[in-house]
Image (cartoon, grey):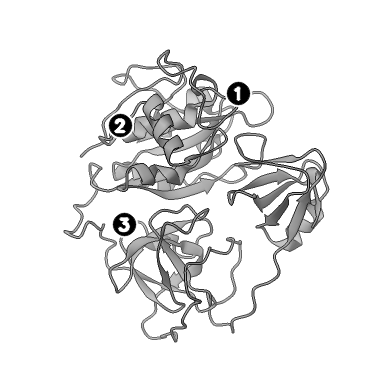
Amino acid sequence: MPFKLVYYSQQDARWKNDILGFGDPGDTIGYVGCALTSVAMLLSGHGYTETPKTLNQKLKNVNGFVSAAIVWGAVSQIYPKVSLKSFIPCTNSAAPLAQIDAALAAGQPAIVMVDSSPASGLQTHWVVLYAREGGDYLMLDPWPYQTDVTKKTYLMPRYAQGKDLQHAIAHVILYDVIGSGGPTPTPPTDGSVSGGGASARVKADVTWGLNLRSSIDTSTTANVIAVEPSGTELTIVETDGASKIGAVNQWIRVRDAQGHEGYAAAWYLEKAAATEPVPVKEPAPGPTSEPPATASTPSPASAPTPEPQKLMVVVKSGGAKVYQTASKGQVVSTEKSGARLVVVEAASKATAKIGVGGKWLNVKASNGKRGYVDGGSVRKG
């Protein structure tokens, strides 16, 4: 079904005073519920009617919050046909406008983070983009602004903060809603989406095997459908999947020869070349977690090497907060003094930041979520 415009305000009296998720008393939907409200508008537009109030409770029922921070992938626990497709931080890089445009053209709106204030620093706010128009996007803004969906509301006049379109967007969340969308090709009878016959192969150096997941949430193994050995060829079942092969922090919807269909980490895939078969290696039994994405992965032709020792840091006295992006925005974890965090960026870059205030370290928090911690709040582990 085509996406229908549905508007909700986080300031609606019916839910604005409700505590968001498992947050503190001051963390109300009216104050910090823009992400939740955006998801409620997206779900309702696809025919899964939810208000911020009802969705807040349903997500709490499935532990879909870390404090007051929404767990994006938890939505699929409520609606299995709604899968988290892409989670793209772009605070310090250009937003993937082509990827957003492709999703919108397929009738799948995007939820994006913007800066709500011209003041210094990033004041995080989430809105729903539903159409591209010239050099701007039409949006549904959960903060009371333009509530009439029959009138056009543009992103740039309110949230550009002097930046161009590519840099006015700081984070992109894309969901894949099966059975929804206007111009999306009609899915085959098995419910998959045609990828034009393209395929990808698990890189030879992925000796641990690559997880195939029902969603891109890596904080749990409950969504692991299968573990694909290195060398396995996978059929791409999304229209723009081939363009993401090898891309860091991207996920591709694929299907294996046994009919298992789900999401695979694109940075551990390469373009399949039938003329150069790679011997299949059996992975260790049971599901494994994807190693962190890095800007550079070993060449598939090189011999497998042992996994390097992970760099650890320890939280100093006073504790520390792990943020969703490299700024003091949405908190994904609050860590106590002495907590050990895994650094998920290259050690060569991370070492110089440890103990230095104002430098952001990409880490895996104690709750399994990835985010950024101020280097001055941690020491070498």
**Residue 42 in the image: above or below residue 32:** below
What residue is pinned by disc 1? 117
Residue 353 in the image: state x and y as whole percent.
Answer: 79, 51
Left or right of 201, for residue 159: right
**Residue 47 in the image: above or below residue 346:** above
Mark 1 residue element: loop
Q: Residue furthest front?
A: 61
Disc nearer the start of the sequence (1/3): 1
Camera-side residue of 253 and 116: 253
Between disc 2 and disc 1, the foreground one is 2
What residue is pinned by disc 3? 239
Mark 3 residue element: loop
Left or right of 164, for residue 323: right
Point 47% across, 37% down: residue: 112
Amino acid under disc 1 = Ser
Mark 2 residue element: helix
What residue is pinned by disc 2? 44
Q: CA distance from mark 2 to mark 1?
A: 28 Å
Amino acid under disc 3 = Thr
